[in-house]
Amino acid sequence: MEKTPVLNAKEQRSVLFRLLAYAKPHLKMIFVAFGFLLLATVGDVLGPILVKIFIDDYLREGYMPFKPLLMLGAAYIGIQILNVLVSYFQLLKFQEIALKIIQQMRIDVFTKVQQLGLKYFDKTPAGSLVSRVTNDTEAIKDMFVSVIATFIQSGFLLFGIFVAMFILNVKLALFTMLILPFIVFIMSLYRKLSSKFYQDMRERLSQLNAKLSESLQGMSIIQMFRQEERLKREFGEINDKHFDAGMKNIKADGLLLRPAVDLVYILALMIVLSFFGITSFDSPIEIGVLYAFINYLDRFFEPVNNMMMRLSMYQQAIVAASRVFKLLDETELAPGQTGKEADKVNDGKIEFKDVSFSYDGKRDVLKNISFTVNPGETLAFVGHTGSGKSSIINLLMRFYEFERGDILIDNHSIKNYPVKELRHKMGLVLQDPFLFYGTVGDNIRLHNSDLSEEDIKRAAEFVQADSFIDKLEDGYAQKVTERGSTFSSGQRQLIAFARTIAANPKILVLDEATANIDTETEEAIQTALAKMRKGRTTIAIAHRLSTIQDADQIIVLHHGEIVERGSHQELLTQQGLYHKMYLLQNGSVERLEDVVG
């Protein structure tokens, strides 16, 4: 798996500014939250000053007038109550802003994933993408919820505390500022170390998700070939690396977050006490000022500790955001319309002109492919595994972009058609049809949300899927589990046929649609296929030669090249590769080498 490089300081700032850009639509709400934050800060700063006034002006002097003390006490209690209410509302607003930002970010990421080309998914594990959309955005949410609000509140509070300190005693406030370089150094060191550790942890978590996703999807194969121990060992190795990265981060947290800051706090306390001890030789100590300074030191290091504790969340969020933005910036998009918009697909004529194609840019899987399928005709492709059959379908469906040659529909390059138009006029049925979680009716309606219940039933009746759907306990409302695992392969295929027919495509593409069908279901499938093909231009990839004998034209592929073409009878007469494949499937060839040699 590709490893994300460790971010330097400049890259981290760039990621942060890009994250903050998501807050622009919520500026009005942010100003309201900042207002509450400022009020809460004022309340925190005023409390010790009121106590200082009570000690120096009243308690030390032994002067206890009822009315002034009552007002002073009421002001102190009122500030504390108001502070609680204001803190609640500012936290509520920041949480609401954070959730809205992450809501938009997840939509952006999910939308981007839908736009990516299949070439990207070929090289990226599904679990890694799931991790970007869920775990990484959740880490970003924590930053908006906790980190930014805490940093801003702490910044306001620190500023307020220093102002109050300078009001009380300028010389002592200047001495206290000697601790700032130590705090900045600790924060900088922690940020540098934790960035590397969290980068590693995020990558390992992504790998864990990828391995888990792969294991769940291939569970039947894992159990069949007794690969449980191997998968457990591989999962354990990744998990151990995640643990090691976590322990390194915990050690950095344990040393730099609390102990180092507490050490600086003790240093600051020593400065304050030493100052008052030295000045006591020349003048009396103001107990209220001493109390206020000690109190402000406690309050000073509370936001410092809060900021240090949130630094870990900040680093996680920056690392997670860099991974999310890398996905958002991915340029491996699905092929789109690149030329002038062509007319809509009307007749369904298909023509390949000297098309060559390579997945990796090195080895051609298709070499100078040329053929024509007239409207209403059926063209079938046959050939051994790896001959290029599915690659032709992938290019026709615009799943991959091609650079050499051209593909025409109704005499216009498919690059000139809007992808929406192509997908609307093409119906694709795969060897292993994909059913979505929902109901049978939902899976048939997939192409068109405007389809009525009657339209769905007519599509099912057309492909003879109604015979088993009507027998289901809930009929068309029957729940479909993940990938339709409770249905047989034939039933899934019939639902896929109904889904395709409901869209009423002009061109029908069948990618070995009968390869996994049991003998009992095959007759119903063949009848459905015959009805579906009528009046439609059809391209079929065939595994069983018996299913395409009535095709208008059959093309034989070998290592990405067309080696034979003609009708079923014409190809048998040529006694070439097709003839050998036909004999092999009918049990007339003893040695496989004679066929593939």
Image: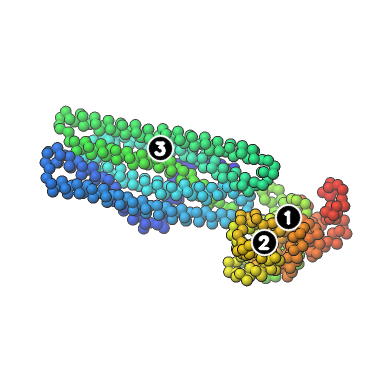
Q: CA distance from mark 3 to mark 1?
A: 61 Å
Q: Is residue 192 above or below residue 148?
A: above
Q: Is residue 476 above or below residue 489?
A: below
Under tag 2, what secondary structure? helix
Q: Position of residue 270 (x, y in %)?
A: 27, 30
In this rendering, position of residue 309 left or right of residue 68 = right
Task: Tell whether label 1 touches label 3 (CB within 8 Å).
Answer: no
> What residue is at 13 percent from the left and 46 percent from the top?
66
> What residue is at 80 percent from the left and 58 percent from the top?
545
Residue type at the position of mark 1 = Asn
Colour convention of the picture: rainbow
Residue 533 versus residue 192: which sits nearer the camera? 533
Residue type at the position of mark 3 = Ser
In this rendering, position of residue 576 left or right of residue 461 = right
Q: Residues within 10 Å of mark 3 (few under 14, many from 20)?
A: few
Residue at mark 1 = 516
Under tag 3, what secondary structure? helix
Q: Earlier in the sequence, mark 3 or mark 2?
A: 3
On the question of residue 103 being in view, the answer is yes
Residue at mark 2 = 496
Q: Earlier in the sequence, mark 3 or mark 1?
A: 3
Instruction: Find the residue positioned furthest to the front.
Output: 473
Quadrant into which the N terminus falls: top right
> What residue is at 70 percent from the left and 55 percent from the top?
391
Q: Earlier in the sequence, mark 2 or mark 1?
A: 2
Residue at mark 3 = 188
Under tag 1, what secondary structure? loop
